[in-house]
Image: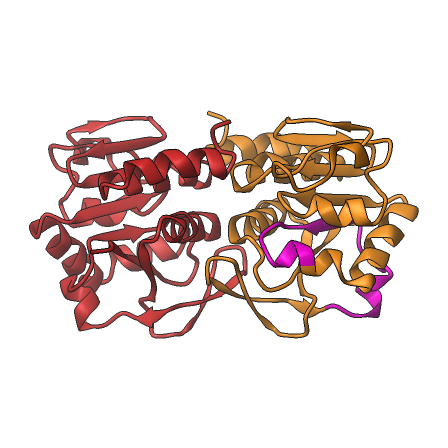
Chain colours: A orange, B red
Amino acid sequence: MGKSVLVLCCEGFEEIEALTVVDVLRRAGVTVTLCSVEGRELMKGSHNIYVKSDKLFGEAEKEGRGYDAVVLPGGLPNAYTLRDSSDVVACVKKFAEDGKLVCAICAAPCVLERAGLLSGRKATSYPGMVKKESCGAYLEDKVVRDGKIITSRGPGTALPFSYEILRALGLESDADKLEKNMIYKV
Amino acid sequence: MGKSVLVLCCEGFEEIEALTVVDVLRRAGVTVTLCSVEGRELMKGSHNIYVKSDKLFGEAEKEGRGYDAVVLPGGLPNAYTLRDSSDVVACVKKFAEDGKLVCAICAAPCVLERAGLLSGRKATSYPGMVKKESCGAYLEDKVVRDGKIITSRGPGTALPFSYEILRALGLESDADKLEKNMIYKV
């Protein structure tokens, strides 16, 4: 069975972070749902790029039904809106409880912090976006994976973040191939 | 006076390549026009991401009026459609004749090849996308700048390509700052 991944966006999502994940995962045959949390089909990014969502956030998304992973891009106010949505925090907690992958980049690890998922874990974020004491260990690596939690730092780390998500989904050889085919590693 | 850059897209544009340029240049205060060549406001990328264009290709774009640079993202069929459009090839030639910057990444250097702009120049592209004998010297660097022509290799080189465009526009200090702030160079 193919893998299925949910990407949650609100207004002000960071375009490189959100769309690099969608691009890379779809290249590996993953079904990616770019999901609009605020009820508008056309979503405005933090650099005024408008992107059409595939779906609006609903019950299936809140409960994680049919998805193997959830991905939260950064960008403001996107990351704060995600953090302050009780439905999104419930969704992220449900993914974690069900043993599914939870991934956040740049400002978005603050959503995982709010959900209590960084406690006792290695994690990273955009500098200053989560309290170091919220994590088991705060690292400055481009991408940090601790069990089913993957965090990363910013637009400049969106590609290695996406390849790590593929690896955590069991698609290691696709990740290796794409790193070369996309001229990330030459 | 602020700088103004034209990005040309057709169906099948590579999302990372097109939107990384828009994102990075707008962060530096450049006015970026994401321009749809095929007459549709909503443009479909090569990984089924739909992005709203700012403008449709018209006379001002063909003549380069008001723009300091033109940027061509890769992705297929986008790059071939751009190459096979006499209006786009005329536009690219006009930018070059006027001493403006002409930039292409991944498959899109084939448009510059068609316009005769690689002759006698150092250039690069996605492997196999231009004939080596069309260039003065074909290089395998991530980004190659020769005078007012900038070429690059693929989605994995979209960030350094974008920073090089900023530098060629005279925005060196913005490029330096963004490389750090976007966690590209740490």
**Can residue A2 be seen by looking at this rendering?**
no
Q: Residue at x 31, y 47 (%)?
A: B108
Q: Could you say which is closer to the camera, residue B126 or residue A87?
A: A87
Residue A63 colored in magenta in the image: yes
Q: Residue at x 24, y 36 (%)?
A: B131
Q: Could you say which is closer to the camera, residue B184 or residue B142?
A: B184
In the depicted structure, whether residue B51 falls above or below residue A18: below
Q: Residue furthest left?
A: B97
Residue B44 colored in magenta in the image: no
**Can residue A110 be seen by looking at this rendering?**
yes
Q: Could you say which is closer to the camera, residue B99 or residue A163?
A: B99
Tell me residue A176's x, y (percent). Answer: 60, 29
In the depicted structure, whether residue B186 falls above or below residue A75: above
Tell me residue A110's x, y (percent). Answer: 72, 46
Looking at the image, residue A143 sits to the left or right of residue B48; the answer is right
Q: How many marks?
A: 0
Tell me residue A114's x, y (percent). Answer: 80, 49
Q: Residue at x 69, y 34 (%)?
A: A124
Q: Hey, which quadrant is residue B85 in on the image? A: bottom left
In the depicted structure, whether residue B14 falls above or below residue A184: below
What's the magenta region? Answer: A57-80
Looking at the image, residue B31 sits to the left or right of residue A106; the answer is left
Q: Could you say which is closer to the camera, residue A42 or residue A154?
A: A154
Q: Residue furthest right?
A: A97
Looking at the image, residue A24 sits to the left or right of residue B44; the answer is right
Tell me residue B44's x, y (percent). Answer: 47, 64
Q: Residue at x 87, y 46 (%)?
A: A96
Looking at the image, residue A103 sits to the left or right of residue B177; the answer is right
Q: Hey, which quadrant is residue B128 in on the image? A: top left
